[in-house]
Amino acid sequence: QLPAHKVTPQDLADLLRAVNDKGLARTRERVRTTLHRAFELAVTAPYNDAVPVRFKDYACTVNPAKAVPRLQGVVSDKNPLSLAELRTYWEIIKTVPGLKGAVLRAHLLLGGQRPRQLCAARRENLTDHTLTLIDTKGRRLLGQPPRRVVLPLPDQVVTVLAELPPGGEWVFSTDGGRSHLT
């Protein structure tokens, strides 16, 4: 309930402690990271023309989240499956029939892209050799356009995509491409 420029590291530590005390260490780290980025934007707003001018109104000169340390041993799981687990997963999904199987196989064969981005793939962004996804994560606050992620389509992926119903606006759809999977 304080103005942004009056928030102290102790205020943030107390907030994060309350989240961590509920056994939500990973959530605590996400909140800390979000606060750090938000305050960093507010601090640099007067000097950064890419940041909306309204951020100057926060009048922040320091980032109080910088003083709050990360929790040790709490990291994002960037490699969740071991090789054996990955092989088991593939053995399970390689024979799943229909749309469900095709989507699971495409997801894995395309490198485990964010499911929300993959499901929102448009046919206009699909060629014989590539699929372009639109990555909006983390860009909205900075006013930057979404990043385009161009994925190559190896033969195995082309085969999987051929299993999908043709037509419509969306690559992954249950209604002929009128809406995308969620």
Image (cartoon, rainbow, N blue to C red):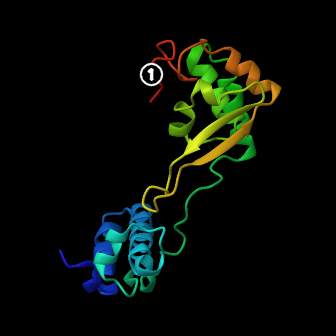
Q: Is residue 28 left or right of residue 92?
A: left
Identify the residue at image location x=34%, y=77%: 56
Q: Residues within 10 Å of mark 1 (few under 14, many from 20)?
A: some
Task: Residue at 40% x, 83% y: name it.
Answer: 63
In the image, residue 55 lies at what x, y percent?
Answer: 34, 72
Front residue of 167/107: it is: 167
User: Is residue 120 found left or right of 3 in the rendered image?
Assistant: right
Q: Which quadrant: the N terminus?
A: bottom left
Tell me the quarter of the image containing the C terminus: top left
> Which residue is drawn at the image coordinates 60% and 24% (left, top)?
123
| The quarter of the displayed image where residue 57 is located | bottom left
Residue sitting at the far right? 155
- When the figure is inspected, residue 38 is found, relative to residue 60, above or below; the finding is above
- Taking the spot 65% from the left edge, 44% from the top edge, the residue there is 149
Q: At which x and y percent is residue 78?
A: 62, 55
Residue occupied by mark 1:
179
Q: Secondary structure at mark 1?
A: loop
Front residue of this view, candidates 84 and 4? 4
Q: Amino acid at mark 1?
A: Ser
The x and y percentages for residue 81 are 66, 46
Q: In x, y percent, where is residue 103?
A: 60, 25
Q: Give the total of numbered labels.
A: 1
In the picture provided, is 123 more to the left or to the right than 22?
right
> Where is 107 relative to 3, above or below?
above
